[in-house]
């Protein structure tokens, strides 16, 4: 099997890289924080000293990082990913970053004679652990076909979206809906509580009717318990929505609800909720409404 390089051993990266190895690939890893290597457990992985070393020794190099700045910091420079790329190599960015940065990186990769795919994911940590992520892929179709087996080690739903940048744009759409859905769900339940209907009763009705949603299914216990263990951080939801509004401004598309959602999630970050699950926006709205 080919060598697969993986950069970024966060909450999502750890289970993803373990599943790649279970699929039989030789895996080379790199992470900026060396403490994260301990989370790989007893399984042996080859550890690279630099991102360049990962790319030089891998057919596929995958990044799963926090944001645009993190990707750029490890991509360029004498020890960066780009320095280790060349013909016959494929670089796959599975991070959720700015579409503008995605396009810039793609051009530099192709300038080295290598191939590029943007392939963000949805499904959160449990899906990553089970190898059941949904993976949205942008890039050349033949590059996608060459990479499908690697994607299959991490995901259950692997969907080719279109040309370079299409994957990250699809992720923007996904996370706009995710974030706005959580906001209106939170607001409606607080309004129902004000009207004298307890949240448990509301959720029982909503779960069985036309107002049900995946967000309600996944986050109802967080609301009822007022506990928000992070599966997808609120600060990351704010970041992703901000990428969407940035893209819309650049393309002069008049988003209406999304910029408002960005403002409210920014309020959540400023209120110290950024490291909690994005469903903690319910706590922010609760505090605001209870004071009114």
Image (tube, rainbow, N blue to C red):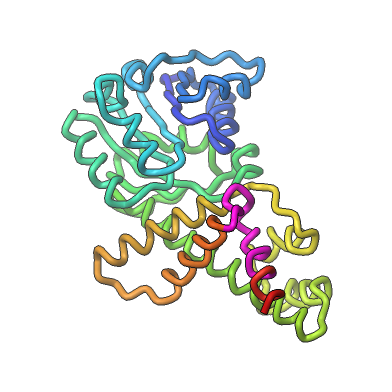
Quarter the N terminus occupies: top left
Q: Is residue 71 left or right of residue 212?
A: left
- Image coordinates of residue 171 in percent, x first then y, are 44, 55
Q: Residue furthest front?
A: 291
Residue at position x 60%, y 74% in the image: 184
- Image coordinates of residue 20 in percent, x first then y, are 53, 28
Of residues 286 and 209, the one nearer the viewer is 286
Residue at position x 41%, y 14% in the image: 49
Magenta region, residue range: 271-286
Q: Is residue 191 magenta?
A: no
Of residues 286 and 139, the one nearer the viewer is 286
Say above or below: 22 vs 137: above
User: Residue 243 falls in which quadrant of the image?
Assistant: bottom left
Residue at position x 48%, y 31% in the image: 8
- Image coordinates of residue 82 in percent, x first then y, are 26, 27
Number of marks in picture:
0
Quarter the C terminus occupies: bottom right
């Amino acid at each position: 099997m080919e060598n697969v390089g993986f950069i970024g051993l966060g909450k999502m990266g750890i289970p993803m890289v373990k599943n790649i190895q279970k699929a039989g690939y030789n895996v080379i890893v790199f992470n900026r924080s060396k403490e994260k290597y301990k989370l790989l457990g007893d399984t042996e992985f080859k550890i690279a000293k630099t991102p360049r070393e990962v790319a030089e020794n891998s057919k596929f190099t995958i990044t799963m990082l926090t944001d645009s700045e993190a990707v750029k910091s490890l991509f360029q420079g004498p020890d960066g990913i780009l320095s280790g790329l060349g013909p016959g190599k494929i670089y796959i960015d599975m991070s959720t970053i700015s579409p503008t940065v995605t396009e810039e990186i793609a051009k530099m990769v192709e300038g080295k004679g290598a191939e590029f795919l943007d392939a963000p994911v949805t499904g959160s940590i449990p899906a990553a652990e089970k190898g059941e992520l949904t993976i949205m892929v942008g890039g050349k179709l033949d590059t996608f076909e060459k990479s499908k087996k690697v994607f299959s080690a991490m995901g259950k739903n692997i969907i080719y979206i279109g040309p370079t940048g299409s994957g990250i744009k699809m992720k923007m759409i996904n996370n706009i809906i995710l974030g706005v859905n959580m906001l209106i769900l939170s607001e409606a339940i607080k309004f129902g509580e004000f009207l004298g209907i307890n949240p448990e009763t509301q959720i029982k009705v909503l779960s069985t009717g036309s107002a049900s949603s995946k967000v309600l299914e996944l986050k109802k216990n967080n609301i009822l318990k007022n506990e928000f263990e992070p599966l997808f951080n609120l600060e990351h939801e704010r970041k992703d929505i901000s990428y969407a509004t940035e893209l819309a401004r650049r393309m002069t598309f008049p988003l209406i609800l999304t910029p408002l959602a960005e403002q409210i999630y920014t309020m959540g970050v400023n209120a110290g909720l950024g490291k909690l699950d994005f469903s903690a926006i319910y706590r922010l709205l609760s505090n605001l409404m209870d004071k009114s």
